Image (cartoon, grey):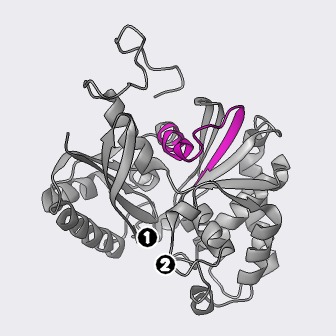
Amino acid sequence: MGLSAVIDLGTNTFRLLVAEIRQDRFTTVFSENQIARLGEGFSEEKSFRLQAMERAMGILRAFKETLGQYTIDQLTVIGTSAFREAKNSQAFLVSIKEQTGFDVEVIAGVEEARLTFLGASLAFPNRIGPIVLIDIGGGSTELIIAEGETPSKMMSTPLGVVALTERYLRKTPTTHEACDILKREVAMTLQEVVSVCPQNAFFCGTAGTLTTLAAMDQQMATYDPDKINGYGLSKKAIEAILHQLLPLSLVERCRLPGLEHGREDVILAGILILLTLMELCHYDLVYVSDYGLREGVLMDRYRRRPHDEGVSFWKEAQGQYAPRPPWVI
């Protein structure tokens, strides 16, 4: 079969993945992340700004040009939090279709959580027992609780790093008072979540905040996903990075090894979401996955296809497709 491609249109970052799948395993052929900041100003206006849409469209045109270099058998383009909420989302989706030919599938928050878990868990193939996965995004934060490979609870919260940064962390250097105010809001939002998070769980995370922290902790001059997958970050190490960042300007932050350009302003909000959950649940360590929504969509679409090589996510032993589990929207 040919190659499969997935584009994840996040509130902060657009991600492209081209991969070859054989026998339920994928090999990355091409991968690229671009900071789109589509959610710029969204917390105030609830609409995409013209400048943000133009910036996003430029990235999508570049992605289309990249895809033209490959023979793509299946392409899936996913829209997440910002597309679910923006007043002008439909008009922008029509514009994307007209200018790039991409049909964007806007998914619900719980479906985003399910697919993210499917992708992120590929980094921990032999893990058994209770798992808590956090996905800190630009427009929302998802939490997934699972026993082995089976998610039992999936929650989507409105805690996005772009909105929180615009609301509380506009000024640099950043004060401890501003951080405390943000953490109080995060703690209030996470209270119901915390009550169902097992304290003895394998705690892991995906998306830009987590992968950036893992890269910074290893002082990576060049990002290496092989050194990110499975990397353990202690709460103490995360707190050290937080205190390192607080007194710095945005320009000074960009000089730190491992900190992706374009993430220097929103990284603090992501760290504070992560630390708040770790404190509330008494987690001292978080394991990082470079895989996430893109990889989950890739595998989900592959496993749904009728072919001989794959094993469907919902296929029964007789070869028939089982009904979707009750936690799937």
Res. 262 mark: 2
Res. 132 mark: none
In the rendered structure, which segment of residues is drawn in magenta?
Answer: 113-136
Q: Any magenta on residue 98? A: no
Res. 37 mark: 1
Instruction: Give the residue displayed 18% in from the left and 54% down from the top.
Output: 97
Describe the element under mark 1 as helix, strand or loop.
loop
Describe the element under mark 2 as helix, strand or loop.
loop
Q: Any magenta on residue 122? A: yes
Q: Is residue 152 visible?
A: yes
Q: Is 230 drawn above or below residue 250 in the view shown?
A: above
Q: Is 67 drawn above or below residue 308 in the view shown?
A: below
Instruction: Give the residue displayed 46% in from the left and 52% down from the top.
Output: 81
Q: Is 193 drawn above or below residue 170 in the view shown?
A: above
Work out whether residue 67 or residue 278 is closer to the camera in this orientation and state it. Answer: 67
Contact, mark 1 vs mark 2 (Cβ under 8 Å) = yes
The image quarter containing residue 299 is top left
Few, some or many residues within 10 Å of mark 1 (<14, 14–19, 20+): many
Q: Position of residue 6 (x, y in %)?
A: 32, 50
Q: Position of residue 313 (x, y in %)?
A: 43, 26
Q: Position of residue 120 (x, y in %)?
A: 54, 46
Which residue is at the far top? Answer: 318
Q: Amino acid at mark 2?
A: Gly
Few, some or many residues within 10 Å of mark 2 (<14, 14–19, 20+): some
Q: Amino acid at mark 1?
A: Arg
Work out whether residue 254 or residue 81 is closer to the camera in this orientation and state it. Answer: 254
Of marks 1 and 2, which one's residue comes earlier in the chain? 1
Q: Image check: 154 left or right of 99?
A: right
Q: Is residue 208 visible?
A: no
Q: Position of residue 315 (x, y in %)?
A: 40, 18
